[in-house]
Amino acid sequence: MKRPILEVDHVTKAFGGLLAVNDVSFTMYQGEILGLIGPNGAGKTTLFNVINGVYKPTKGRIVFDGEEITGLPPYRVVKKGLARTHQIVKPLNEMTVLENVVVGACFGRENLGLEPAREVAREILEFVGLADFAETLAGKLNIALKKRLEVARALAARPKLLLLDEVLAGLNPAEVGRMLGVIRKIRDQGVSILMIEHIMQAIMSLSDRIVVLNFGEKLAEGRPEEVANDPRVIEAYLGDPEMAKRILEEES
Amino acid sequence: MKLLRQPYFWLIVAFTALFAALPFWNQNITLRETLVLSAIYIILATNLNLMIGYTGYVNFGSIVFFGLGGYFTLWLISEHGWGLYPAVLFAGAVTSILAFLLGLGILRLRGAYFALATIGINEAVKDFVANFEAWGGSEGIFLPFTAFRAMGGPAKALWTVYLLIVLVMGLSLLLSYVVKRSKFGLGLFAIREDEDAAIVLGVQAPLYKSIAYSLSAFLPAVAGGLYFFKNGSVVPEEAFNLHLSIESIVMVMLGGQGTVTGPAVGAFLYERLRGILLTLPSLSNFHLVIAGVLLLLIILFAPGGLMGWLYRVWPGLRRGLE
Amino acid sequence: MPEILASVLDGLLIGLVYGLAAIGLTLIFGVMDVVNLAHGAVIALGMFTVYLLYKAGIHPYIGLLPVAVIGFLFGVLIYLIAVKRILDGPPLMTLLATFAVSMIITGAGTAIWSTSPYNINFPVTTLNILGYTVTSARLIAAIAAVLVTVFLYIFLYRTTLGKAVRAVANNREAAELMGIPSQQILAVSFGIGTALAMLSGALIATLFPFTILSGGIYELKSFVASVLGGLGNPTGALFGGIILGLIEGSVAPFIEVSWTNVIEFVIFVLILLFFPTGLFGGRR
């Protein structure tokens, strides 16, 4: 019996006259990896910002684990168990890797004190493979490690749902492989994952289901194979339905 | 946190005790007057550091708390016959509350806007007080001699007040240390590094900033009350002297923002430097220039200040000192 | 002409000068995201430069050209010494660095000229246009402000260098990728911003007596005008200046001068709290 962990209910976000997100609805179930894809500017990060409270939706509701969280500020949302990473990483530069993760542990769902938070932080660093860098200043890491730190910090909040925003962008193939491994380990721990990605192969192989956004609207939803063969999705990425048809014909 | 087991705690206690004892044990009044000024600077710089160094918000008008503390205290004593102790505590509390309320408004501004707003507040309060008849307008408030009688006469009172100011200095250092090692402090540092990231991580930034701001007001207000009591009077120009605010910033940056020891060291060094400059006639007008040059050099070449440099040269020190 | 209308027209004319000053501030912010806290000190420097030139026998209006050139060079110098090194670091640092520059300028100025008031007493005629009495100085100052703004626009939109400035303001990395030497453009932009500030100071000096500390007042006005128009938006800054001037003109007959600062400060804070992108929309 699948339990819904997140319900995005007719969410619209307008900036002045621009509809960044237009009447998007979908449900996500506990334990699954849901991929969120779409061409650039489709509104994916904006949707993330609405889900975790950075923006208030113009219309619609967000229900997390049965509780309505629409309009709650991010620092309350994370305490409910919903954590997120950023597309452009935001390390706390002058603090060490360990301290960064301690912040996540202290102010996350468990609201820990400093000492227990340090314990949790060390565990998380082991889990993601950053233990060797614990005392390094976050600002000095390379992009791949910064991305892993971003994930570690979000994990430290002990979330039930993790929002990953293009966590593979800018990584070389070896680093992508490592990060995919980490993501699988997170899912194995029972954390649900909603991820935005552009690397098609990765997201198609990782996700249980996919939601496709285009121009702020939901274009398609379903299992990866279904979505991959949907001509509307192909057209959205390539812009030309004739070419989409030809590709499909070539494939078969 | 097991405060009493930390060596740094005892360092603060020893330093404070030394400060108190030095002029006291042979009743050296000149030394006392020099040290009281140092203590005041250390108080201002250390508390300002809570905003600049810990939270990352530059408060250009922090002197307003010092002045308000002085005014509230002297007003309570001269108009309402309060004793010194209740008066300064009340002044400190009221100023903190005012700071908290003010903070709810202006802490929503970031960076430069916040900085400018704090200057504006200092100037606005100064203008207001200078026109406020109940507080003596531009003449200020003068304490009658009787105010010192309750403390055993002026000579004894001055010594008592000196010790109280040194106590406030010790408390400032202690507050700075306790905050730095606390979860609250961690939240502040996260805000300093990246406020948006901190919020997403769960730090309740608006509340934390307001608390930091109002904490940074309390002890300077108490110190202001004690200082102006000692002087026997308070006038708007002296109470809300923007230059002192600015010099506090230089002291914090010079010593090392974000550390506990830094602002105290910076305050002490700057105060010595200033004293030397004021005695050289050719250079006395240039003291703002020199402060500016110093600040610029620190920003450009040593943004971590003296402590930052020491920690780089001698990393082991970081664990011993704060 | 009723007093209030004359006051408002006076406000409009001075508002154009405020606008010029505000453009100097907003341009630097728009191009490099730096809030130039040395702005006020530079305005004061402009006042004293035109004064010194006048003492050397150069008529203030002729003096505007050397003031602009000196302002530009000085701005480039400030950029190279104080800003360039820390440009992409935490905003706190550029804030404190430009503030340090302002301390140095103001401190040096106080040492040289003390805080006494100075005045440029050059012959001025009074004109009467349709019942509105105005000094030639105020009219010329307004016209000069408009002319400089027009020249600035021609520069930004019709010259290659100006376009490069706009490109860097828009997206520095992209501009670099297209071969634009961003460091030089940044220096030039800071120079222009400083030149505009000094020019506005010089124009104000032709209207009112001034001290080394006068810069602070006009810095506040520049900030108010800039945020009214949206920081980073030069057109907005000009209109912000005009609006500010009009507001001053409308309340002047009713309120004591010492309250203007407080009112402007309150406007400043209110705009920042409720219209952070200004009335016309800026960058942040």
Image: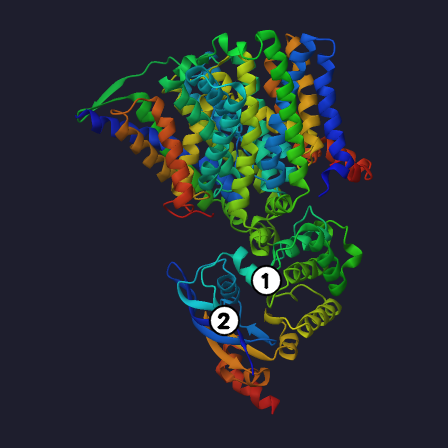
- Disc 2 is placed on an element classified as loop
**Quarter that holds the C terminus of chain B:** top right
Q: Name the residue under label 1.
A: A84
Q: In this view, does C59 lie above or below C229?
A: above
Is residue B188 at all visible to an observer of this figure? yes
Q: Does residue A52 appear to the left or right of B189 in the view shown?
A: left
Q: How crowded is mark 1: few (under 14 residues within 10 Å), some or many (20 or more)?
A: many
The secondary element bearing badge 1 is classed as: strand
> Is residue B32 shown left or right of residue B319?
left
Cα distance between the residues tagged 2 and 1: 19 Å
Q: Indicate the position of residue B307 as horizontal and vertical percent values.
A: 74, 33
Q: Which amino acid does label 1 sit on?
A: Arg
Front residue of this view, candidates C87 and A98: A98
Residue C104: image x %, image y %?
Answer: 59, 23
Q: Which of marks 2 and 1 is nearer the N terminus?
A: 2
Q: Taking A226 as reference, is B42 left or right?
A: right
Marker disc for residue C47:
none
**Which residue is under mark 2?**
A66
Circle 2 marks a residue in which chain? Answer: A
- The vertical placement of B321 against B63, above or below, is below
Q: Residue A179 at what x, y percent from top left?
A: 71, 68
Disc 2 residue type? Answer: Gly
Residue C259 or residue B262, whichever sits in front: B262
Residue in the picture at 59% in, 53% down:
B197
Q: How many labels does the image show?
A: 2
Q: Is residue C195 visible?
A: no
Residue C93, quarter of picture: top right
Query: With respect to residue A236, does A171 lie above or below?
Result: above
Q: In which quarter of the image is residue C112?
A: top right
Q: Nearer the viewer, residue A41 or A223?
A: A223
> As drawn, is C234 to the left or to the right of C70?
left
